[in-house]
Structure formats: structure tokens, C-alpha cells
Amino acid sequence: MDAGRLRGRPATWLRGANPWAVDIGLALLVQAAMTIPFVVDRPAGLRPATWADYGLTALAVLPLAWRRRAPVAVVLATLAAGAVYKLTLDGPGQPLPYPGLIALYTVAALSPARRRLSVATLIGVLVFPSVALNTGDTKELLFSFFVFGAAYALGRLTHTRQAYTAAVEDRAAQLERANRIEAEQAAARERARIAREMHDILSHAVSIMVVQAEAGPVAVRAAPERAEAAFEAISSTGRDAMVQLRRMLGVLRDAPSADSPRSPQPGLAALPDLIARSSVGGPRISYESTGAARPLPLDLEATVYRIVQEGVTNAVKHAGAGRVWVRLAYGRCEVTVSVTDDGRGPSPVSGPGTGHGLIGVAERAAAHGGSTSSGPRTNTPGYELQATLPTEPSGGEGG
């Protein structure tokens, strides 16, 4: 992480403060510490401290207000002011070089490696003449190296902590974005699933009811007993659609109610009833199952049911078919379902929403790792919808 990203990121408890206000406040605090030697009596034999002495200390502190904008320049300014104070005035000495320590800390925390190492080397070299001009004592020399080294180390620790904090915050932001995207994708998948269910339920029910209602008046005149069966099929189809719709609405609620109990979706056991309802007043529909029948997962049974429902609905609504064949073939690792008719196939223009049912069939099959095909029959009138669905989990993710 470079210095540009770290600038303007003070300690956590100051993160909301204005950087200018923080730096000016720090400069005032340092100036208060520099003032202490001027308000106590000096030892006998030394001249009194003057306003010029005090003004020069303030000149060394003033650059700290720009310490984060120009760290290296602030170090050089404080060093120069300190050197002038030492060489030209006999003012009160300071127990610690506060401006220099803070300036070095800032360089260590914010500057690139080359700059901070150059500044650290410069200060290390200047310590020797500074100590020589003061006491020349080895203890003072070691203490000076210790305090400046501690300031540099503290600056590097601050840089590391801020870099770690920034990385954690970035990671949290990325996770938040990923969770939001995942939630949006899950909502989109759920909307698509609900749309498929609504299409399958309403399209089939309305198509069967329309066909049977159209056949009803003719049957009343020609064969009253068939008219009674047609009207009974209309009411039965309507009731079944209402039950399924209530079940779907119950799933969308927080909790099931007495009017919308949560029951499993229709499966293979419901296919004969679906075919019987669709046959009344419509094409003649036959159903056969081949291969070794075996229990299937409930979600796979629901998919087979919806595919058969869509195929029968298309044959009744669009194809003008007289015969429809529904076949369920069990293979070793898959089940194949096909709906074939002898009609003219889907109309090129059959109203809004054309093709959504076949798209839904393909989506349902793909969710199980299966495939679908549809189109006119070869060398004979009619249309065929076929889907092959694995009955064992595949290596990829399930839908």
C-alpha cells in the first residue's frame, strides 16, 4: 500500500476528524511541551530566556501542521530550525527533540522506502555532531539513537496496522458486494422459477378449459352425456389450478395458512389424472412407460410432470392434434420423457408469450443436467417434445 492511500487515515479514534485540525492540534500540543522550559526559572549564571528564543522554538514546531502533506520537507525544516536554535542562541534546552521525533515518525509511517531510509540515515549522521555540541556524553548519544529509533519503529508499526486495517475493510467491502450480487442472483432465479410455475399451471389449465368449453355446446346438441363430462372436466381443471396456485402463494408467505397448505408438487403419480383431464373434449391422449420403473427424486418427478404438462398443453392449444402420445422411458442412468402429437405443430404467431413454455422446459431440464429437443416429426405430420434427464447426480453442480 503506497503513502497516498495511507495519508488522511489517522488512528481509528481520530478517523472521523479533519486531518488539518488533528495536525494543528498536535503542533499546539508540541508547542506547549516546548514552552515548559521557558516558564521555569533558569539556573544562576545563565542569561534569561528571551522572546527570540521562544519564537525560534515556535518556528521549529510550525511545520508540523503540514507533516502529512510533505513529510520529508517537514523533517528538513525542523532540523534546520533546531540547528539554528542550537548554534545562534543560548536558550533553554529541551529534554527531548519533540518536533524532530514527530517528523521522523510521520516519514516512517507515510513515505516510500527510499525516502524514509534516506531521512533516517541523515538523522543518524546528525546525531553525532548534535551530541558533541551538547554534552558529548556517550549516554546522551545512546539515548538519542534510542528515541529516534523508537520513533521510526513506531511509524513503521503504524503503517503496518493501517495497511492491515485497510485490507480488512477492503475485504469486508468485497464480501458485502459479493453477498449483494449473490442475493440479487438468487432473487432473479426465484423469480424465474415462479414464472415457470405460474406459466405451467395457468397455461395448461386455461388451455384445457377453453378447449372443453368450446366443445361443450356442440356436445350438448350431439351427445349430452359428453357435455356433462366436459363441464365436469372444466370445473376439475379449475379446482386443480386453484389448489396449485394457493400452494405457490403459500410458499411465498412467511408461514402456511389453512387456505394454502404446503404440499409437495405433483409427480409421476399425478400423470394419469393430468392426461385424463386433458383428454376430455380434446385430443385422444395415450400414456405408456417403458424400462425398469423406479422411484425418482421428488424434484425430478415434478420436472417430468411439468414437461408432460407443457407438451400436452401445446398439443391441445396450438397443434390442433387428434392424437397425443406421452412416453416415459427409464434408462440405466436417465429417464426420457416425450410428448408427440399428429397435429400441425405450434403456430408461428399464437399471441403474446409464445415460446416461454419451451424455454421453461429447457431451463427445468438444464437444472438437472439434462437436455431437451423439440420440433416437427420426420416424414409424418406432428410435433415432438423430448427431454432426457439424468437420474443420478452429475459431477457438476445441481440447479
Image (cartoon, rainbow, N blue to C red):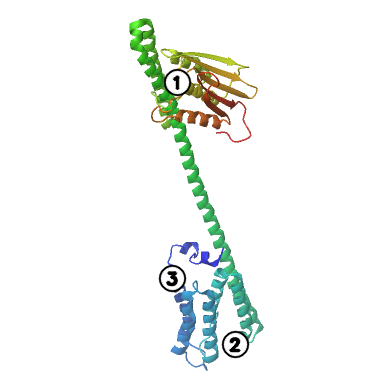
Numbered badge on residue 319: 1
Q: Nearer the viewer, mark 2 or mark 1?
A: 1
Image coordinates of residue 123 in percent, x first then y, are 60, 79
Q: CA distance from mark 3 to mark 1?
A: 78 Å
Residue 353 vs residue 303, the one in the foreground: 353
Mark 2 element type: helix
Label 2 to label 1, Cα distance in Å? 107 Å
Question: Relative to residue 153, is residue 222 drawn left or right?
Answer: left
The 10 Å Cα crowd at callout 1, few under 14, some 14 to 19, many 20 or more, is some
Q: CA distance from mark 3 to mark 2?
A: 35 Å
> Which of the two discs, 3 and 1, labels the residue nearer the N terminus?
3
Q: Nearer the viewer, residue 265 or 192?
A: 192
Mark 3 or mark 1, whichever is nearer to me: 1
Where is residue 213, by image quadrant?
top left
- Residue 20 is tagged as 3
Residue 185 position within the rendered picture, expressed as x and y whole percent measured from the top left: 48, 41
Q: Tag 1: residue type?
A: Ala
Residue at x-position 57% and y-position 15%? 289
Q: Between residues 48 and 188, which one lies in front from this camera angle?
A: 188
What residue is pinned by disc 2?
Answer: 134
Q: Quadrant of the N terminus?
A: bottom right
Q: Amino acid at mark 2?
A: Asn
Residue 362 rendering spot, x and y as whole percentages: 52, 30
